[in-house]
Image (cartoon, rainbow, N blue to C red):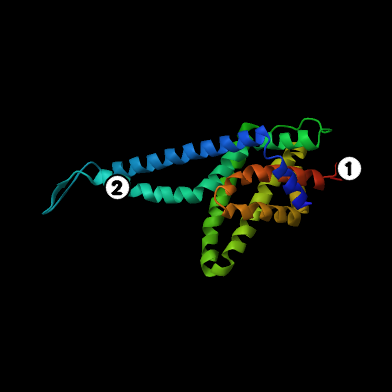
């Protein structure tokens, strides 16, 4: 079921709505990271000040520029690691478009779904971003202790988080948040397995940027396979 759902999602990647969500997510992510890099560089220069006077050396007037330049490679390095979680969080704001495109193509008999409000979507996106970043920071300890198993730990952890997020996004459009949580608990292992399938491409540069769209489409299929409106 999971593989079939993933293949169906891949087969629809040419959909204009899929591509629109992908481009919006990546564009906003790049803009946000550039703004943060600029802000950190400016703050580093401001904290150091325009000049400083040292004994036997005299007045140095270039420290603010040096601090700003020193902050640049650090922020560029961090942006490499933050690109995917930030893109995932921002893209999740628009994933309702992906789910709707999937349902119109594969489940045309369904009526319109209840849209998720922007406020709820923003709250969920920020919560997902915080959880994703925090969990992976904590997992760094496990990556160092169990280095040979690091890829499997990464896939298991992020698979759990991705499956949890994307299934909830797909389900709550149709059955509401409370019922989505109940279904998620009931089908935890299946959802986790689907999440691991989404987590594996996270380790492939550039390919990892399509994971949010692919995940939303895949778990829309998964939800409709798991949910039986006659018994929930």
Q: Quadrant of residue 105?
A: top right
Q: Nearer the viewer, residue 20 or 85?
A: 20
Within 10 Å of disc 1 (Cα), the crowding (few <14, some 14-19, many 20+) is: few
The tag on residue 218 is none
Within 10 Å of disc 2 (Cα), the crowding (few <14, some 14-19, many 20+) is: some
Residue 38's x, y, as percent?
A: 38, 39
Element at label 2? helix
Q: Nearer the viewer, residue 190 or 214?
A: 214
| 73 on left or right of 178 | left
Q: Quick one: quadrant of the C terminus? A: top right
Q: CA distance from mark 1 to mark 2?
A: 63 Å
Please name the residue shown 42% across and 48% down the image: 76
Residue 111's x, y, as percent?
A: 81, 30
Q: Residue furthest top?
A: 112
Asked whether residue 182 appears in the rendered view, the answer is: no
The tag on residue 67 is 2
Please name the residue shown 51% across and 46% down the image: 83
Seen in the picture, residue 150 relative to 131 is either above or below; the reply is below
Q: Along the polypeptide, which appears first: circle 1 or circle 2?
A: 2
Residue 103's x, y, as percent?
A: 76, 36
Element at label 1? loop
Q: Residue furthest right?
A: 230
Q: Quadrant of residue 231?
A: top right
Please name the residue shown 47% across and 36% down the image: 31
What residue does disc 1 label? Answer: 230
Please name the residue shown 60% across and 38% down the image: 22
| 79 on left or right of 160 | left
């Amino acid at each position: 079921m999971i593989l079939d759902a993933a293949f169906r999602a891949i087969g629809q990647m040419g959909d204009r709505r899929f591509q629109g969500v992908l481009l919006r997510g990546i564009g906003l992510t790049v803009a946000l990271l550039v703004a943060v890099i600029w802000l950190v560089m400016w703050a580093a220069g401001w904290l150091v000040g325009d000049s400083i006077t040292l004994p036997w050396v005299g007045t140095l007037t270039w420290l603010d520029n040096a601090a700003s330049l020193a902050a640049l490679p650090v922020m560029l390095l961090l942006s490499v690691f933050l690109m995917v979680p930030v893109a995932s969080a921002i893209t999740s704001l628009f994933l309702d478009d992906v789910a709707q495109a999937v349902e119109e193509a594969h489940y045309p008999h369904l009526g319109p779904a209840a849209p998720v409000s922007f406020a709820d979507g923003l709250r969920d996106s920020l919560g997902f971003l915080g959880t994703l970043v925090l969990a992976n920071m904590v997992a760094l300890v496990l990556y160092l202790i169990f280095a040979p198993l690091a890829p499997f730990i990464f896939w298991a952890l992020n698979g759990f988080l991705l499956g949890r997020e994307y299934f909830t996004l797909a389900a709550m459009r149709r059955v509401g948040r409370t019922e989505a949580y109940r279904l998620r608990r009931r089908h935890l292992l299946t959802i986790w397995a689907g999440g691991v399938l989404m987590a594996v491409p996270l380790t492939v540069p550039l390919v990892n940027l399509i994971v949010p769209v692919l995940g939303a489409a895949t778990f829309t299929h998964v939800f409709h396979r798991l949910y039986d409106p006659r018994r929930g």
